[in-house]
Image (cartoon, rainbow, N blue to C red):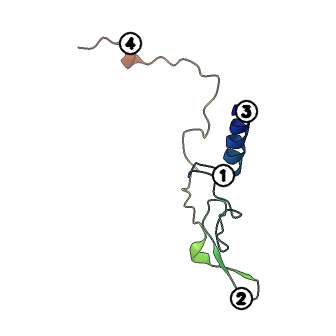
Amino acid sequence: MALGLIIGIARAYRRKRTSSLDILSSKRAPRDYYKGKNCKSTGFHTRKGGYVIMPEKLPNYVIPDLTDFKLKPYVSQCATEVKTTEASEPAK
């Protein structure tokens, strides 16, 4: 008797998820729901199945000119210890 009750509760739990924080997919949502991949659209779909890209929706990256820049772009994994004169002087 008790075993049948436990099996029935397990089946009911398997059928219906109690958490409201489940992952929402397009199969569990309304018909017009489109999840996407967490990125903004770059245009719109036409009536005949085409896609029009809008230039004002495209990302615009502003990169500065680094021709005479003194620093290197990457930090070495084998860092060496650098001694300066300010660190060795006692504070007054």
Q: Residues within 10 Å of mark 4 (few under 14, many from 20)?
A: few
State how far apart marks 4 and 2 are (Cα).
73 Å
State how far apart marks 4 and 1 are (Cα).
69 Å
Q: Residue at x 67, y 42 (%)?
A: 9
Q: x and y percent of residue 57 in the render?
A: 58, 73
Callout 4: SS: helix
Whichever of callouts 3 and 4 sits on the residue coming sooner in the sequence is 3
Mark 3 or 4, closer to the camera: 3
Q: Amino acid at mark 2?
A: Arg
Q: Which residue is mark 4?
A: 88
State how far apart marks 3 and 4 are (Cα).
77 Å
Whichever of callouts 4 and 1 sits on the residue coming sooner in the sequence is 1
Q: Amino acid at mark 3?
A: Leu
Whichever of callouts 3 and 2 sits on the residue coming sooner in the sequence is 3
Q: Residue at x 73, y 37 (%)?
A: 4
Q: Amino acid at mark 1?
A: Lys
Q: Which mark is residue 47?
A: 2
